[in-house]
Image (tube, rainbow, N blue to C red):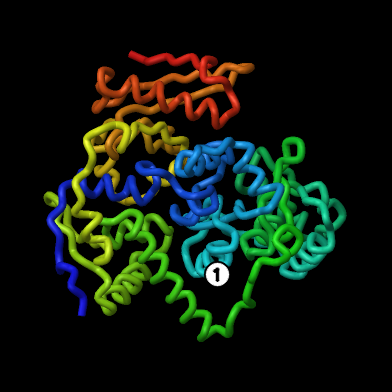
Amino acid sequence: MSTAPSSLQLSEEQVLYFRARRGHLAGPGAADAATAAQDLLGAQAQQIAPALLALSQRTAGRPSASAIHAQLADGPRTLVRTWGQRGTLHIYHAAADWRDFNLVQADWIVSSRRGLMPPTATVNKVRKLMEQSAEPWTRANLEGKIPAKYLKDAKEFVVAHKMAAHTSFRFAAGRILWVITLNGDASLGKKIGAEQSYVARKQWFPELAWPAPPPPAQKKKEIAQIGTQLARRYLSLYGAATTKDISHFFGCKVSEAKLWIADLHANDELIHVQCGDRIGLLAMANDADELLGKPPTTLTKWPIRLLPLWDSMMMGHHDKSWIVPNDTDRKRIWRSGAYVAATVIDRGRVVAIWTHKVKGKMLVVEVEPLSLWKASRHLAGVKRELISIAKHLSIKAKAIALKLQN
């Protein structure tokens, strides 16, 4: 019988510190970038540079962008960049998480891409050719391999949807490579010129265990088991949280998240959390002691961080008021087109947004204060964090230009 309490009374700061610790934004950091990716349940990575910074910030020793990128594109490959939850690109721990996320996402709402899927026979033909090739593939490799009818349909689709950036070939080739990657048969490689490359899983990860899809009835059961395990891991990272938060993070239906929570309840793994006037908060019972811990007061133990674009912390909850209490501030962070600004975060809350450019050998940074900003507290911490970011980008610490907007 569990000896954990049935409910906890927590302050917001206790919850925020727990999340910071579990998300490696406080404490020593993960042992390596692959572990950081695993602990984060994937780092969102539609742009590669922000994802590399997000993993570096959460890894002991703050490895450089090139060092983490090598784990994606060179070897030994411990990371994989592919389509994941919410229909967006993520970096995952290849051995621990790729297959599971690939299996379950087919049952989730994985993407807004709809209509005009490529012929299955064409997808299978290209996949086999990629598996036989030792080189990465781009759209150019599909020249002469796309049926004329699909190219004709692609032209009509591009015109009907006013997709000015696409030719019929570019759309059709991109859609074929996307489906192969979505199926788990390939992942994203390095850029070749301006083009994204893709590499067959059997080429880059020949030793990776990849069980065949089970029969339908067994597959449904396995997906449910993986979902429950992901919900368990989510609450161990982002608790206290609600069922709606879980649904938001994974991009699944609330009804699915409720089934996972029911499984955890049935095993007496959950506790209810009281935190102000928030309702429906849950946490893992075995995290009770850490949740009840007293947050540190010093910046050395809970430092200011400059999080990159689309950082996982910004994507972790449906309820954004935890980290950005001010509605006007929220509108400056989560913008149209699924854009999520880079943020300065102090004690679990956003105090500013920031942008940067690399000009020659100089890191040029602009910080735009939000309502919680206090220069006397935050400016020194921003400068310290920028030294680590410059190192990550292989820029000398003295080659930093910081501008604070009024």
Quarter of the view holding residue 406: top left
Which residue: 35% across, 55% down?
237
Q: Is residue 205 visible?
A: yes
Q: Is residue 220 left or right of residue 359?
A: left
Q: Position of residue 370 (x, y in %)?
A: 29, 26
Quarter of the view holding residue 92: bottom right
Q: Position of residue 42 (x, y in %)?
A: 49, 53
Front residue (pair 118, 366): 366
Which residue: 50% across, 29% down?
389
Q: Is residue 46 left or right of residue 338?
A: right
Which residue reaches farthest right? 144
Which residue: 33% across, 54% down?
238
Q: Is residue 129 left or right of residue 44?
A: right
* Quadrant of image for the N terminus: bottom left
Quarter of the view holding residue 284: bottom left
Label 1 crowd bin: few (<14), some (14–19), many (20+), radius 10 Å: some
Query: Which residue carries the number 1 mark?
Result: 103
